[in-house]
Image (tube, helix red, strand yellow):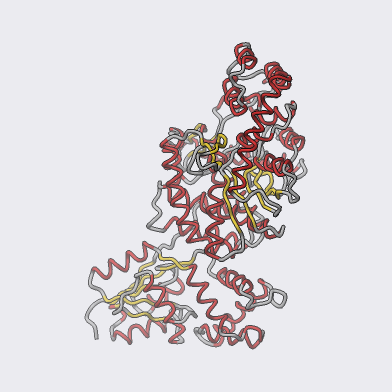
Amino acid sequence: MTSKVVESFDVFDTLITRKLDRPEDVFRLLYRRLVSVRLLDPNLLDEDEFLSLRRQAQSELYRTREEGSLDTIWDWMARRFPELTSPEFQQAELETERTVFFPIPSGVDLVRAARARGSTICFISDTYLPEDFLLEVLTTFAIIQPAEKLFVSSAYGRIKRTGRLFSVVLDYYQISPGKLRHTGDTLAADIRPARAMGIRTRLFARPTENDFDRRIAAHPSLKTLEQSVLLGTLKHSRISPKIQPGTVARLVASFYGPACLVWALWCLRTAEAHGVRTIYFSARDAYLPYRAAMNLVSALGLRFECHYLEASRYSLASATIFEPKRDQLEWWLAPKWESLSAKRVLERLSHLGCHDHPVIEEWFHGCKNREQITVSDKDNLLRLLEQDELGNHVVQNSTILRQRFVDYLRTRGFVGNHPVLLCDIGWRMNTSRALRQMRASLSLSTDVISAFLFFNERRLFRDEAGFGVSMCGQVPSAQERSRLRDRVPKLAWLRDDAVEDLLSLAPHGTTRGYEIGEDKMARPVFGPITPRDLRFRKAVGECFEEYAQEHCGIFFEAFQTADQCKAAFRQLTDVFIATPPADSLGPLIDRTGSCELAQYSSHGFISPYTTLDVVRQFMPRRLLKGRRVDKTWHEASLVASPVLLRPVVRRTLALRKWLATALRRTQPSED
């Protein structure tokens, strides 16, 4: 009989938990794993039927006895569905459970503190899982020590809820109830039955979801398992000791990690649907999805070839000018002329080698407004570029650039008669169009299948989930994009593109063009990049690599359709841009030097508009001569809400949401 105090600890949701929002979702994950390894035919038993059968098995066993074991559960299921007889099913379940467990640091700290006090430590759990399996999990996480005892209900046929498993602990140590102190997370199974026996108790506060999690879960298209995985991995990032608030790791875990993983999965699912095995990720924005895809292919043995192209829409578009036509030149030079300065136009003309041409210099000095190019100046420039002398110069330079780029593509295996999937963000000038033109000029028989995100220039509705207008195989036409912009209601809370700034994370600057080295090989030429931005990109890349290796398996099994990946990506980007978690903003503050982001708190919201800008948004467009405010997320102004004004702010936000919803109902859906 021990004279020391014995301290017992509940296991699940006190010391360890799952990377899932609901524990029973592990059975959905198990089902998908069984189907993927061909142990189970989905035509004989679908996911919901499997989950229902599993629930029935546990309910029946709990009705006839206090606790069943994994053996008895699968025996009961096999009697009703003979295809489930193989012992491989139990092994698959244990392996699935093993991949989703992770420790809760605050609970583990309580165990260490009790051990430091000299108490005798034991662990107690109501579970059907085998005792030796749970012991292995606790040992892996360094929670249990060799001399400490584990009491599992499946081994004793008794549970905590009735108090009988506590009696096993008292008998084993031969102590009175007053000598035992139990820590657990539930009143019904841990606190009340223990107190009824005279055992001292301590209620453990389990990790709970926050407002950011609830907003992520709100997308109506996210199904049970997909939503559970998103929330579970976010919970993991909040409580993991390796992911501290205000660090790049927290930013990756909150946004870059899940967003780029589902983007990469969307590309893989799209390629699979089209029967394509070769995938190219292009430009800076697609660098992290490329890294994610490489992790998925390597870890899971997928039959895809993933490549990365150092390219940009400007370096490619300048190589695809076959003749100096106005529409092609206008498309290449700028998507939004009203936002360009004359100096910026000269920078783009330098790609064509004509920025220092006497005719262009004369045009530049004659510009009416060098800060914002006018319509007449634009028309004059395009007219000059169409003239014979200057036009021929442009075409000749484009031919040289095109040959260099084709040589570069050959080194990447892109030039050939095999189908490829090209993944990119489709902004107003995208690499897909340039690459398709390039393959057409080479008379290749296979097309480039475009699979890229497209983001509208303006957000349609503030409360509509997703900045992405589509994640599909083709870009909406210019006419369609114009129609989308025109239908933005005046009362909608508009916001400019922000994802481009967040996702431009390749460890190099913008691709300016291509050159032939001494080894006669074509290689990209990069533009300048600031040391601060380079440090940020490298830090994100390192943290993202670790995140992808840890979570790629569970994401792959959860997100099995392109539509689910699309819904998750749109919701993640929407919520993060609109209401980013404050503990993730530190690295962005360091990257952008934004004072507004540094002031962000839970009592304020970030808007890209000042008060005057808000007034301008409500004014008729004709009074503003068609001009609107152009501000990105990083240039946002903070609208703080002091304590006395919080009720007013909440009512204002509610009214704004109601107005946007009402206006949306009057418009047909664009998605």
Residue 347 appears in which quarter of the rendering? Answer: top right
- Vertically, is 60 above or below 284? below
Residue 660 appears in which quarter of the rendering? Answer: top right
Q: Nearer the viewer, residue 624 or 664?
A: 624
Q: Nearer the viewer, residue 135 or 501?
A: 501
Residue 17 appears in which quarter of the rendering? Answer: bottom left
Q: Quadrant of the N terminus?
A: bottom left
Examine the rendering and report whether any part of residue 578 can be seen. no
Which x, y percent locates residue 591? 44, 38
Q: How many marks?
A: 0
Examine the rendering and report whether any part of residue 135 can be seen. yes
Which x, y percent locates residue 270? 68, 56
Q: Residue furthest front?
A: 519
- Vertically, is 658 above or below 636? below
Q: Is residue 550 left or right of residue 55?
A: left
**Residue at figure coordinates x 62%, y 14% from the top left:** 358
- Vertically, is 427 above or below 271? above
Q: Is residue 95 left or right of residue 221?
A: left
Which x, y percent locates residue 99? 49, 69
Which x, y percent locates residue 326? 74, 26
